[in-house]
Every structure is written in C-alpha cells, then in structure tokens.
C-alpha cells in the first residue's frame, strides 16, 4: 500500500513538472530599477549567454522542454547582478 502511494505521489510530481512553464526567462521578467536601459540590456545579454552555456553543458540543450536549467542560471545571474524578479 505504501509503495502504491509513493508511486502515485511520484507520478503526480512528474506531471506537475511537465506542466510547468515552458517559457525561458527574459528581460521582461526583471525590474531594472534605476539602472540605465543600455546597462540593463547589457547585463541581460551576459546572463542569457551564461544561461545558454550552462544549459548546453547540464541541461538537454536546445531541446529542454521546460527551460529549467536555463531559467535557474538566468535567475541566479540576474540576482547576482542586483536585479529583482517581477512578481
């Protein structure tokens, strides 16, 4: 009985992950604050390149349906650059 419950919980978690957002993060997801637009876009470009490199090394490359690896690295880079994600 416990094994069946664990199997159902695991299946539900997999389905929930598959239904997660398939959108890659962009500049529109972050608040630039008082940063000049040109500097903000430069920082976004750096974070995009870093996230793409990370995704190719650790994710499923351009075929990652959830953009999970890309989004985690993009978010980490943007936070490290001092930007907050919009709610």
Image (cartoon, rainbow, N blue to C red):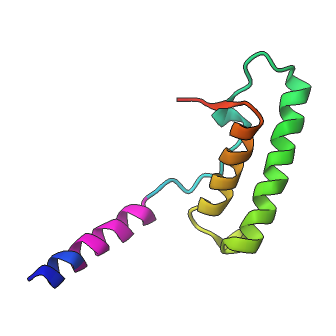
Q: Locate residue 57, reporting x and y percent.
A: 76, 73
The quarter of the picture where residue 34 lies is top right
The answer to which of 1 and 45 lies nearer the viewer is 1
The answer to which of 77 and 16 lies nearer the viewer is 77
The stretch of residues the image draws in magenta is 7-19
Q: Locate residue 12, reporting x and y percent.
A: 29, 68
Q: Which residue is rendered at x = 66% and y = 75% of the image?
A: 60
Left/right placement of residue 15 relative to residue 22 reads: left
Given the current orientation, which residue lies at the most extreme left position?
1
Q: Which residue is rendered at x = 73% and y = 36% of the image?
A: 27
The quarter of the picture where residue 72 lies is bottom right
Residue 75 highlighted magenta (yes or no): no
Q: Locate residue 37, reporting x and y percent.
A: 86, 23
Q: Which residue is rendered at x = 22% and y = 76% of the image?
A: 6
The quarter of the picture where residue 66 lies is bottom right
Given the current orientation, which residue lies at the most extreme front position?
80
Given the current orientation, which residue lies at the most extreme top position?
34
Q: Which residue is rendered at x = 74% and y = 45% of the image?
A: 77
Q: Locate residue 78, reporting x and y percent.
A: 73, 40
Against 36, is 1 above or below?
Answer: below
Q: How many marks?
A: 0
> Looking at the rendering, in which quadrant would you find the N terminus?
bottom left
Against 84, is 13 above or below?
Answer: below
Secondary structure mainly formed by the magenta segment:
helix
Against 4, is 27 above or below?
Answer: above
Left/right placement of residue 43 relative to residue 5 reads: right
Left/right placement of residue 5 relative to residue 15 reads: left
Residue 9 highlighted magenta (yes or no): yes
């Amino acid at each position: 009985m416990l094994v069946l419950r664990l199997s159902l919980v695991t299946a539900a978690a997999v389905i929930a992950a598959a239904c997660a957002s398939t959108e890659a993060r962009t500049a529109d997801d972050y608040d630039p604050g008082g940063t000049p637009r040109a500097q903000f876009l430069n920082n976004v470009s750096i974070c995009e390149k870093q996230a793409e490199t990370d995704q190719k090394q650790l994710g499923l490359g351009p075929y990652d349906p959830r953009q999970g690896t890309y989004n985690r690295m993009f978010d980490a880079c943007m936070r490290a650059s001092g930007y907050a994600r919009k709610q």
